[in-house]
Amino acid sequence: MKRTAHLSLVAALSLLVAGCSDSNAADESADAPPPERAEAVAWIEDFEDQGAEAIQAREEATEEAERQEEAAETCETKSAPLVGALQQLNSRLGVGMNLLDYTTYLGDVQVEYDVYFADESTFADDPQGALDCTLTAVGLELALNSYVEAHQIWNNCIDAYGCSIDDADTDTEIQAAWSQAGTALASSVTSIADLEPEPIAPSQIRRSCDELGDSIPSAPESASGYQAEWDSYARSVFTAVGLPSARPFVTPYAVAAMRVAVADEDSLADVLDEFETEVEHLSSACEQLGEDDFD
């Protein structure tokens, strides 16, 4: 929902809770709740275990995403000096340089390479992060080796009688090594960026972001024990995004909405708090998808 709509919901829920505290006790002689309430209660019982499992799955996914995000940032920081040195050498090739300058830039890359692999403490508490980061360095190592190969070809040609780097064969070999280095470097940079975790909210939940926020029913005016509008909303939530990958977000939200549908005077305040918590979770999931608001 939009921020204003979200605030309106919170305000409505707050007023409702306050109003409920002032309402008279239900008349003991009141008619029994409609059979739809019993169906709604049965619906909750059918899905509350799934809801609990979904919440646990969501928490585990959130923890894993946080680990991946931290590992990605650490890997990017660890790799930055080596990547920077390689990129600087690659950029200099575009404007030309002599062998002496090339040797100097290549030496800078070698220094950063040695530092990179000498540091074994960066991922001391995250072996998976260490492995993932090391795999991205394969391209960096290949880039360095290719630049070294080009240096050897160049240097050997200078030492060889009658050889010129302008010769077609020699130039082709050097250019091929440089091209391989550039490709490997670009691939490694992409691999490092790809360590950033995907949003834990699946793309299928976008329909929730677009539709469910605006269609939240008005807060109940009284705790009647059964609110047909909230019953209908809870079922629509559950069926609107029915793919299993979306259940960690949708199932707890739908169950929380159904609890509002069957709330009585004693439980209303608690179930409204529970529903508001799920609003926050679903809103956060939508924001991860690039939505400005849960709406």
Image: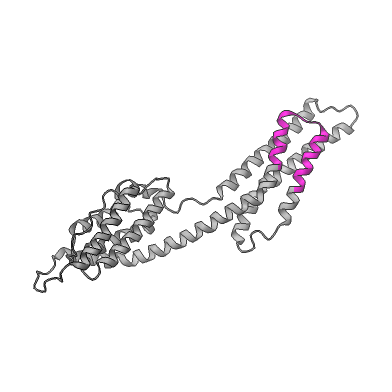
Does 164 sit above or below residue 86?
above
- Residue nearest the observer in this picture, 121 or 157: 121
- Residue nearest the observer in this picture, 54 or 212: 212
Q: Residue at x 63, y 60 (%)?
A: 123
- Residue nearest the observer in this picture, 117 or 230: 230
Q: Report the span colored magenta.
A: 85-111
Residue 87 in magenta stretch = yes
Residue 32 in magenta stretch = no
Corner quadrant of residue 234:
bottom left
Q: Position of residue 8 (x, y in %)?
A: 29, 52
Please, what is the dominant secondary structure of the magenta stretch? helix
Corner quadrant of residue 188:
top right
Q: Position of residue 80 (x, y in %)?
A: 66, 47
Does 101 sit above or below residue 226?
above
Q: Residue at x 26, y 50 (%)?
A: 215
Q: Residue at x 40, y 55 (%)?
A: 245
Is residue 12 something one can see in this rendering? yes
Q: Horizontally, is 251 left or right of 141 in the view?
A: left
Q: Position of residue 81 (x, y in %)?
A: 69, 47
Q: Position of residue 286 (x, y in %)?
A: 39, 50
